[in-house]
Image (cartoon, helix red, strand yellow):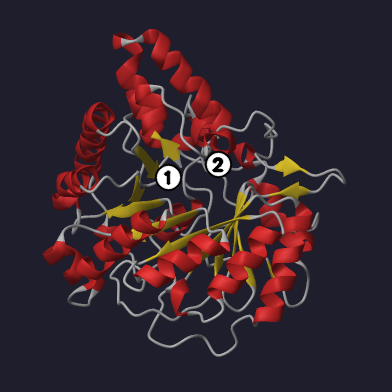
Amino acid sequence: MISITRLLCGRAGPSDAMRYPPNADATTGGRESADGKIAPAVVVWNCTSACNLRCAHCYSESGAAPARDELTGNEARALIDDLADLGVRVLLFSGGEPLMREDIVELGAYAASCGLRPVLSTNGTLLSPRTAERIREAGFAYAGVSLDGLEKSNDEFRGVPGAFRKALGGIRNCIDAGVRVGVRFTLSRRTVGDLDNVFDLVRDNGIPRLCVYHLVYSGRAMAGDDLPHDEMRRAVETIFRRTEDLAAHNPETEVLTVDNPADGVYLYLQQRDADPVRAAETLRLLRANGGNASGERIGCVGCTGDVFPDQFWRTHVLGNVRERRFSEIWNDPDNSLLAELRRRKEHIKGRCATCRFFDACRGGMRARAEAVSGDIWAEEPACYLTDEEIR
């Protein structure tokens, strides 16, 4: 996650202390607890595979019904206890649609009582005024609502008529209830035409956060759905331009991009000649952030307990929390994939291996590399920087 607002405008956001951690280990990118264990800053829990929409790019391939053997409430509380003991800071409740799980509010409240920061990733259609009040009362610190364009394109993309209006209503209900809320927009061939429109929507509705996600080729999202590199560059330039506009008119709104660390490097390269002082600060923050953190600062638990290096990368199961605690799986010295991810400079190939910005990116999304080439250490296929720029 890259705060374009911070890098471009110099304004810190609510989560910047975690995004640019001064105490992150330079080798692993993780945090060490008092007993020497590595704790991811964020764990995504796909708490159910049930969803009331049919999104074209769903990485978890969720459907109308929950999985047959999803974690029970007691198993979820045991997971939360373990994450809290390990030192995890944020538990992101995702899905499917997490609000289709009946005990989601109670589990969020339990996570908050254990010292975790519960946040919600939702399609927003079930965020009634009462539900918004309940998640605020439970202690949810943030709700990210997915919108992939305005009404026509969003509803086509999500497969259900009326989804846009319900989601926008859910956002407004969160604002009225005092829940910090933001829009999550995924760039793809089908959605890029609405990028400016989504910025307008965020500006005109006083929404305090916009996260623009790059497509990860997982589940129903395929590499052919992604933007060509030249179009991706133009889209990112639009994000930079519109972020400056938002900073002038909606100074409290934060813009971030997610799942392509090249965005931060591209911004640095644009700043380098025009504002060398700002550019130097941008590069410092990018290196502090460390780029991709799969298997290090972020982890994922699936709805039936499987543990993954991140929420998109589901071809590699690290273990299951029904058999071993997450903390044991995450710190297993015999897990070769985790060991390699925490020493990825030794394994990365192609352009990524010689890139002078590796310490600000760390090779991007390994899920994309594997999806395209079959090799988890191949170069990042979504990197749109030129050979001259990274040499």
**Relative to 233, residue 143 above or below:** below
Q: Is residue 381 left or right of residue 22?
A: left
Residue pointed to by mark 2: 348
Residue pointed to by mark 1: 380
Residues at badges 1 and 2 in contact (C-beta under 8 Å)?
no
Question: Residue 372 at what x, y percent from top left?
Answer: 39, 57
Front residue of this view, candidates 103 and 238 = 103
Q: Residues within 10 Å of mark 1 (few under 14, many from 20)?
A: many
Question: Residue 258 at what x, y percent from top left?
Answer: 41, 46
- Could you tell me if residue 330 is visible in this image? no
- Could you tell me if residue 164 is visible in this image? yes
Q: Residues within 10 Å of mark 2 (few under 14, many from 20)?
A: many
Q: CA distance from mark 1 to mark 2?
A: 10 Å
Disc 2 residue type (three-letter): Ile
Q: Residue at x 49, y 68 (%)?
A: 134
Q: Is residue 16 left or right of residue 83?
A: left
Question: Residue 45 at what x, y percent from top left?
Answer: 57, 66
Disc 1 residue type (three-letter): Glu
Q: Residue at x 20, y 35 (%)?
A: 238
Residue 268, picture quadrant: top left
Q: Earlier in the sequence, mark 1 or mark 2?
A: 2
Q: Residue at x 42, y 60 (%)?
A: 371
Q: Secondary structure at mark 1?
A: loop
Front residue of this view, candidates 85 and 248 = 248
Q: Secondary structure at mark 2?
A: loop
